[in-house]
Structure formats: C-alpha cells, structure tokens
Image (cartoon, rainbow, N blue to C red):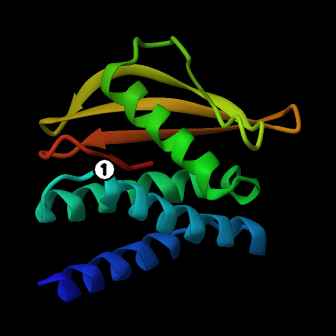
Amino acid sequence: MLYPKTAILLAATLALGGCAADGGPKENSGTVLGAVSGALIGSAIGGGTGERVGAAMAGAAIGGLIGNRIGASMDDQDRQYAYEAEMNALDRGAPGVPMDWRNPESGRYGNIVPGPAYTKRGTRCRAFTHTVYINGQPTAERGTACRNPDGTWTAVG
C-alpha cells in the first residue's frame, strides 16, 4: 500500500523542513527543497519498500542539512552528487581525509571530511564538514550523522 507510506514520508519531510533555523527565504526554501530532494534520492537508493522509506527518511534528513545554507545555490543534480559523496564518506571515509564530488554539468564541486566514528547510546555516529564551492567560493557546513539500524545515516546536528 503505497499511499500511507508516501503520506508519512511527505509529513516527515515537511517536518524536517520546519526545523530550519531563522534563515532568510532562500535558506528556508533550500532546507525544504534539500529535504525533498534528499527524500527522493534516498527513496531511489533504497531496495525494498521498507528500505525505501528508511532511505528516503535518511535522505530527507541529509538533504535538509545540505539544503539550508549551501543547498540554496545547488540544483537537484548537485545535491545528488553531494549526497552520494556524503554517504560514502560516512560509510567508508578515513577520518580527516576529504571525499570529493563534482557535477560536470554545473561545475559545482565540494568535499566531505568525516571525523572519527564514535558510539553514542549504542549507535555509530560521525561528525563531518561538508564544503561546497560555487563560483569558486567555499561554503562549509558542519554536522553530525548517526547510523540507523538499516545502514542509512540520519543527520542529528
């Protein structure tokens, strides 16, 4: 039954979008657009129906984080490259070693530098810094993500 899951996903995405700090209209729009884009990307990555919902939720959380300040100047394809690099950095990246991404169509690029993994209440977490270069100008966001039981990551701060 697809409809209830879609409704839950949409509600969660909008709720995450409401978590935006007191930014301007572009930043808040970027948060919502980032969350929606992240949800769609996460849903596409997830395998089965339950996995898709979980992956979409994780994508919404990460997309919301990317979307706030730096995501306002990124398109969906930029966000997809950034999201995939962020997931790879959190999963496999060595602490302090940048994982680069680049969108050859827009020319936008960036990197994610994961911190060391640690355990918080039985959950694996990592701090990270995500820097995006738009027109050669760097903008960095710092955050923390924790691994879900299904293997996806959720931004927690």
- Judged left or right of residue 20, residue 146 is left
Residue 7 place in picture, x, y as percent = 28, 86
- Left or right, residue 58 beside residue 109: left
In the image, residue 51 sits, relative to residue 16, either above or below, namely above
What residue is rendered at 18% in x and 52% in y? Answer: 47
Residue that extends furthest to the front in the rendered view of this protein? 105
Q: Is residue 54 above or below residue 111?
A: below
Q: Can residue 24 be seen by looking at this rendering? A: no
Horizontal and vertical percent position of residue 127: 43, 31
Q: Secondary structure at mark 1?
A: helix
User: Residue 58: x percent and y percent?
Assistant: 33, 54
What x and y, as percent, mark residue 110?
Answer: 66, 30
Q: Residues within 10 Å of mark 1 (few under 14, many from 20)?
A: some
Residue 87, by quadrant, is: top left
The residue sitting at 49% across, 30% down in the picture is 128
Q: Amino acid at mark 1?
A: Ile
Image mark count: 1
Residue ID for mark 1: 45
Can residue 120 be spotted in the picture? yes
Looking at the picture, tell me which residue is in the foreground, 4 or 115: 4
Q: Who's the residue at 58% across and 68% down the image? A: 33
Q: Is residue 25 above or below residue 127?
A: below
Please tell me which residue lies in front, 17 or 86: 86
Look at the image and tell me in which quarter the N terminus lies.
Answer: bottom left
> Is 59 above or below relative to 124?
below
Residue occupying the point 28% across, 81% down: 6
